[in-house]
Image (tube, grey):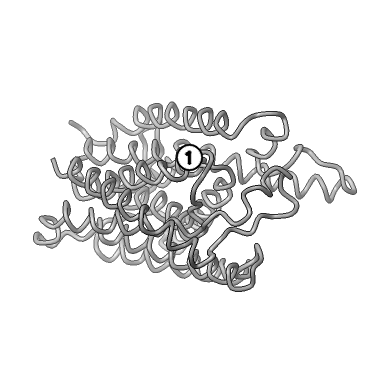
């Protein structure tokens, strides 16, 4: 039961590192700068330590090496590829967070810099999976249980890059309320645990269980009122893991289902910007992204966490039903 070991190790290591990392971040004055155009009551969070995603990144890494060593010995490296892919995005987030702390502002890397780095990571990962034989040029459609066969690789590459960059930034947008990105992503990782076990992909069960364990431990520190934020270091790492596992399982079209909250957060931001420009300054939502709209309507951060996480849990159950018949039992 390697996935149980993976969950436990990731949970334990992350929880222990949190006890060390949070005081260290306070001493280093690695506090979050709060956006002035956000909800006014969020200004009380000014100075809360950020870059806390480091703790679950380390926890997940150690868990994968511990519980997934047998797969490495057999020459199976998919779980390592997924982790390294997510780690690249975590590194991009770390650079962004470092720039913000260095300049004491809420602006780090520029949008073009982030985009190009994320695009390069997406292309390299897809090529790697293709060359290792883990990814086909076919596109499986959940619920309909059919595949679009033989998509040209150039077309598939463009599609994959769009999905990866979009997903990573959508997860990043969701990280705007205490515990929200953490709580929404835990059910997604449990979905991957179930699907990879159902497909007999124990190598991927290890990494998805490690993600679920690390995030569960991080929630101890990140639940409202948060003692630490994951920062872009953590949220971009999570986005990389969400789409990395989807592509490793050859299920990219399941992301809009399990990650509907991510999608809605992104759409709300896009709609707000377009509507604002078209109407000369009017707003479609009270505030974007979506979680701020509900906050402005009186929802507490705890209620947002429970509702958004609960909706995701239900969607993950539905998604599992939608993909469980892909392979004959």
The front one of 54 and 141 is: 54
Residue located 43% across and 52% down the image:
238
Q: What residue sits 59% from the left and 73% below the top?
A: 102
Question: Residue 190, percent across and down?
Answer: 33, 37
Nearest the eye: 211 or 127: 211
Residue 40 at what x, y percent from top left? 74, 45
- Relative to 329, does residue 201 appear above or below in the rendering? below
- Secondary structure type for disc 1: loop
Q: The C terminus lies in which quarter of the figure?
A: top left
Q: Is residue 62 above or below residue 300?
A: below
Taking 36 as reference, is 93 left or right? left
- Look at 39% across and 69% down and name the residue there: 124
Could you say which quadrant of the image residue 253 lies in?
top left
Quadrant of image for the N terminus: top left
Name the residue rendered at 48%, 65% in the picture: 27
Q: Quadrant of residue 22?
A: bottom left
The answer to whether residue 56 shows anywhere in this view is no
For residue 28, above or below residue 7: below
Q: Quadrant of residue 110?
A: bottom right
At which x and y percent is residue 104? Answer: 64, 68
Q: Residues within 10 Å of mark 1 (few under 14, many from 20)?
A: many
- Is residue 116 visible in the rendered structure shown here? yes
Residue position for label 1: 223
Q: Is residue 282 left or right of residue 86?
A: right
Image location (x, y in percent) of residue 273: 76, 49
Q: How many marks?
A: 1
Locate residue 176 relative to residue 153 in the image: left or right: right
What residue occupies the far right of the structure in this picture?
280
């Amino acid at each position: 039961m390697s996935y149980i070991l993976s969950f436990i190790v990731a949970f334990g290591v992350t929880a222990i590192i949190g006890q060390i990392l949070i005081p260290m971040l306070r001493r280093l004055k690695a506090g979050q700068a709060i956006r002035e155009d956000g909800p006014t009551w969020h200004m009380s969070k000014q100075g809360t330590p950020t870059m806390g995603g480091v703790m679950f990144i380390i926890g997940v890494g150690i868990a994968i090496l511990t519980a997934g060593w047998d797969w490495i010995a057999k020459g199976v490296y998919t779980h390592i590829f997924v982790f390294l892919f997510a780690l690249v995005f975590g590194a991009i987030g770390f650079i962004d967070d470092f720039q913000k702390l260095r300049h004491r502002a809420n602006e780090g890397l520029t949008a073009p810099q982030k985009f190009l780095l994320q695009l390069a990571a997406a292309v390299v990962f897809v090529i790697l999976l293709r060359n290792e034989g883990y990814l086909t040029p076919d596109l499986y459609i959940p619920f309909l249980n059919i595949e679009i066969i033989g998509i040209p690789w150039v077309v598939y590459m463009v599609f994959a890059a769009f999905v990866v960059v979009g997903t990573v930034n959508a997860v990043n947008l969701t990280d705007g309320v205490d515990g929200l990105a953490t709580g929404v992503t835990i059910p997604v990782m449990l979905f991957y645990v179930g699907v990879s076990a159902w497909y007999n992909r124990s190598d991927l069960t290890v990494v998805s269980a490690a993600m679920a364990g690390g995030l569960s431990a991080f929630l101890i520190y990140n639940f409202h009122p948060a003692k630490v934020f994951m920062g872009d270091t953590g949220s971009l790492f999570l986005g990389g893991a969400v789409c990395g596992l989807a592509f490793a399982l050859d299920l990219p079209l399941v992301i809009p289902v399990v990650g509907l909250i991510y999608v809605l957060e992104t759409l709300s931001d896009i709609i707000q910007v377009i509507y604002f420009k078209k109407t000369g300054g009017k707003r479609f939502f009270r505030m974007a992204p979506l979680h701020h709209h509900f906050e402005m309507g009186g929802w507490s951060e705890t209620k947002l966490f429970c509702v958004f996480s609960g909706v995701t849990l239900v969607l993950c159950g539905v998604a599992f039903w939608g993909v469980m018949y892909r392979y004959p039992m």
